[in-house]
Image (cartoon, grey):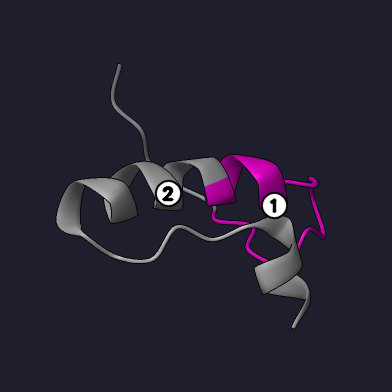
Amino acid sequence: MKYKCLIFDFDGTLANSENSMLFAYNAIADKYGFKILTNEDLDE
């Protein structure tokens, strides 16, 4: 299947994706030695 468009929703207008984005970030952060973030870190 070939896609013509990809939509990113970083502010939660279309979907509440904060937890999914945090999970994905932390998976990569752990691999490369960056700080693991929590929901509380995002509220700061």
Q: Position of residue 11 (x, y in %)?
A: 73, 67
Vertical relation: 43 (above or below) 22: below
Task: Quadrant for residue 12, please give it.
Answer: bottom right
Residue type for callout 2: Asn
The tag earlier along the polypeptide, 1 or 2, is 1
Vertical relation: 32 (above or below) 43: above
Single out the residue that lies furthest toward the bottom: 44
User: What's the CA distance linking mark 1 and mark 2?
Assistant: 12 Å
Front residue of this view, candidates 33 and 15: 33
Q: Is residue 28 visible?
A: yes
Single out the residue that lies furthest toward the top: 1
* Magenta highlight: main SS: loop
Front residue of this view, candidates 9 and 26: 26
Q: Is residue 26 left or right of residue 42?
A: left
Badge 1 marks a residue whose secondary structure is helix
**What residue is shown with label 2?**
26
Residue type for callout 1: Glu
**Quarter of the picture holding the C terminus:** bottom right
* Residue drawn 42% across the image and 52% down it: 25
Task: Quadrant for residue 3, please give it.
Answer: top left
* Residue drawn 80% across the image and 47% down it: 16
Q: Position of residue 5 (x, y in %)?
A: 44, 46
**What residue is shown with label 1?**
18
Highlighted range, magenta: 8-22
Asked if the residue under mark 2 is in contact with the one under mark 1, i.e. CB atoms within 8 Å, the reply is no
What numbered label is drawn on residue 4? none
